[in-house]
């Protein structure tokens, strides 16, 4: 069974294409067993209290211990004035306290806003606090935060009480606010339950399954790792310095292609399932892992809840695509006038259904531009403009054909190149700049040639997250332009051939 589309929105398609639109455009209808992701965790804690929930550097907590610590912290948050629907910062580095913090915020009826303080500038932390209207920030005694940021609660210094009275709080619609560059995306419990508690997004995780936690906490993939594991009763294994050592001890790995490429499949003999997402995956990398594991190639921006399409890639059985819509979601390939393209034609991908998030926090204008009423599902449904190009293959899977605008994904993070360009142009000696992605790395061009790359890099570092800082910054006399007066990016890319050092190419 699949979604029912409004026939009036399909009238310009041929009869054959209309039938294919129905057959391909929607994932199967499934009902997740929970509508609040932490309720799924609490159920496993009640059923298997002694099972190991989380491990990190030789330390561990059982489900009962994790539930109790998160409950105590949730009560502390409530008594500090946190109310259902509030946003609570989670500004720290990877630790068991990080996991306690995630669950505590959800138990308090609030939404957590994660940032890794080891890689995030003070300016960006303040931007997140201001944009998300954060009054309370969770951290640990090992992490340093800027002065006068917000009310600070240190997770690992809470009293070790065994009994306390929990204040009953209402559940929140929004579970997390994930920042993609400078914009915060509101991800709901319904969004997360739809992906994490139905196949294939559940990745076969059951009680006893060990899942690695490799992603930066601020990245949307971390939600898949942390909440996807605990909502399904698995054991979350947080990485230390050696990601491969962690991956070698687990059953399931979720990673960007860059991280997956750094792991040796032969050193990960226990792994049986891999999900790769966040950026384009090379076919050779997918093939090398799919020889011995079940590999899912997934795609989707944060705005549609981590991923909205998945393909189970099998070696030697066809091309690597981004698959089909996950349950209760839809994908439309539309032309510039938002009309369905004939099946097989390339168009812009729009996503509808349960995966569509609640928009950008504090930015109604951007939300209105990127989230539109869904004419195919009708009612109050919204669809999201991914600005990706795609087309349906003859066997009903989606091919990805690049991006229509300057939104890119680097290191698993999605952001706008214009944001980086504006930061480069904020350097004292830079008049003009542009930013490109070359071989998976961010490259900035600044003009005039006398502009100092180190000054430009420092300016970007002060204003934006670490993943927005270009790997290479090239000063040029002037930026070349096309006949229409736009920056000629092809000309700039041609200048990079042979320029990158072997170290940068590796």
Image (spheres, rainbow, N blue to C red):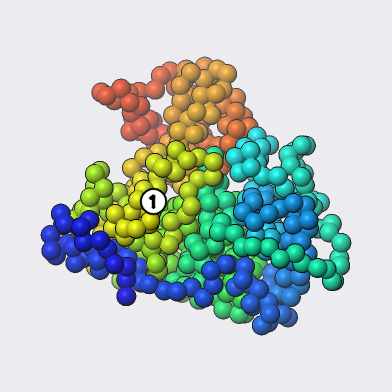
In this rendered view, identify the residue nearer to me: 36 or 506: 36
Give the secondary structure at mark 1: strand
- The quarter of the picture where residue 209 lies is bottom right
Residue that extends furthest to the bottom in the rendered view of this protein:
47
In this rendered view, identify the residue nearer to me: 256 or 224: 224
Residue 321: percent from left, percent from top: 34, 61
Residue shown at 53%/69% (left/top)? 35
Residue 45: percent from left, percent from top: 68, 77
Q: Which residue is mark 1?
A: 384
In this rendered view, identify the residue nearer to me: 52 or 7: 7
444 relative to 308, above or below: above
Circle 1 Cα neighbour tier, 10 Å, few/some/many (<14 / 14–19 / ≥20):
many
Residue 22 visible? The answer is yes
Residue shown at 59%/59% (left/top)? 172
Asked if residue 443 lies left or right of residue 467, the reply is: left
Residue 202: percent from left, percent from top: 50, 71
Residue 410: percent from left, percent from top: 49, 46
Asked if residue 374 lies left or right of residue 457, the reply is: left
Residue shown at 61%/54% (left/top)? 85
> Exactly how many numbered labels are in the figure?
1
Asked if residue 165 lies left or right of residue 360, the reply is: right
Residue shown at 29%/67% (left/top)? 4
Q: Which quarter of the rendering shows the N terminus?
A: bottom left
Residue 210 visible? The answer is no
- The quarter of the picture where residue 352 lies is bottom left
341 relative to 204, above or below: above
263 relative to 234, above or below: above
- The quarter of the picture where residue 243 lies is bottom right
Asked if residue 94 lies left or right of residue 312, the reply is: right
């Amino acid at each position: 069974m699949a979604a029912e589309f409004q026939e009036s929105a399909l009238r310009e398609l041929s009869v054959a294409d209309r039938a294919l639109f129905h057959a391909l455009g929607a994932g199967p209808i499934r009902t997740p067993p929970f509508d609040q992701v932490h309720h799924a965790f609490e159920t496993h804690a009640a059923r298997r209290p002694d099972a190991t929930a989380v491990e990190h550097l030789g330390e561990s907590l059982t489900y009962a211990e994790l539930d109790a610590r998160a409950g105590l912290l949730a009560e502390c948050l409530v008594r500090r004035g946190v109310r259902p629907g509030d946003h609570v910062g989670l500004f720290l580095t990877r630790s068991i306290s990080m996991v306690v913090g995630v669950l505590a915020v959800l138990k308090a009826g609030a939404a957590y806003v994660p940032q890794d303080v080891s890689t995030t500038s003070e300016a960006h932390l303040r931007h997140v606090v201001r944009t998300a209207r954060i009054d309370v920030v969770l951290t640990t005694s090992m992490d340093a935060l800027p002065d006068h940021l917000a009310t600070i609660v240190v997770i690992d210094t809470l009293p070790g009480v065994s009994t306390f009275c929990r204040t009953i709080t209402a559940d929140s619609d929004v579970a997390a606010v994930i920042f993609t560059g400078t914009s915060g995306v509101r991800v709901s419990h319904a969004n997360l339950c739809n992906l994490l508690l139905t196949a294939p997004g559940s990745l076969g995780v059951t009680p006893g399954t060990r899942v690695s936690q490799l992603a930066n906490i601020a990245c949307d993939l971390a939600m898949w790792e942390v909440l996807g594991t605990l909502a399904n009763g698995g054991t979350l294994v947080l990485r230390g310095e050696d990601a491969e050592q962690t991956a070698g001890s687990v059953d399931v790995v979720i990673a960007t292609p860059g991280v997956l490429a750094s792991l040796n499949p032969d050193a990960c003999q226990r792994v049986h399932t891999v999900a790769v997402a966040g950026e384009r995956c090379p076919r050779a990398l997918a093939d090398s892992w799919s020889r011995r594991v079940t590999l899912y190639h997934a795609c989707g921006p944060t705005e549609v809840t981590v991923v909205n399409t998945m393909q189970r890639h099998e070696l030697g059985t066809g091309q690597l695509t981004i698959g089909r819509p996950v349950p209760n979601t839809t994908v439309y390939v539309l032309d510039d006038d938002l009309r369905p393209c004939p099946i097989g034609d390339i168009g812009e991908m729009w996503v509808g259904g349960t995966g569509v998030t609640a928009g950008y926090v504090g930015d109604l204008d951007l939300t209105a531009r990127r989230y539109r009423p869904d004419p195919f599902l009708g009612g109050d449904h919204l669809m999201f403009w991914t600005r990706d190009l795609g087309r349906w293959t003859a066997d009903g899977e989606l091919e990805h054909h690049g991006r229509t605008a300057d939104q890119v994904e680097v290191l698993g993070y999605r952001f706008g190149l214009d944001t980086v360009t504006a930061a480069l142009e904020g350097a004292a000696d830079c008049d003009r700049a542009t930013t490109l992605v070359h071989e998976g790395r961010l490259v900035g061009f600044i003009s005039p040639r006398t502009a100092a790359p180190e000054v430009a890099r420092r300016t970007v570092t002060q204003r934006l997250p670490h993943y927005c800082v270009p790997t290479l910054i090239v000063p040029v006399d002037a930026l070349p332009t096309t006949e229409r007066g736009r920056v000629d990016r092809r000309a700039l890319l041609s200048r990079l051939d042979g320029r990158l050092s072997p170290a940068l190419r590796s």
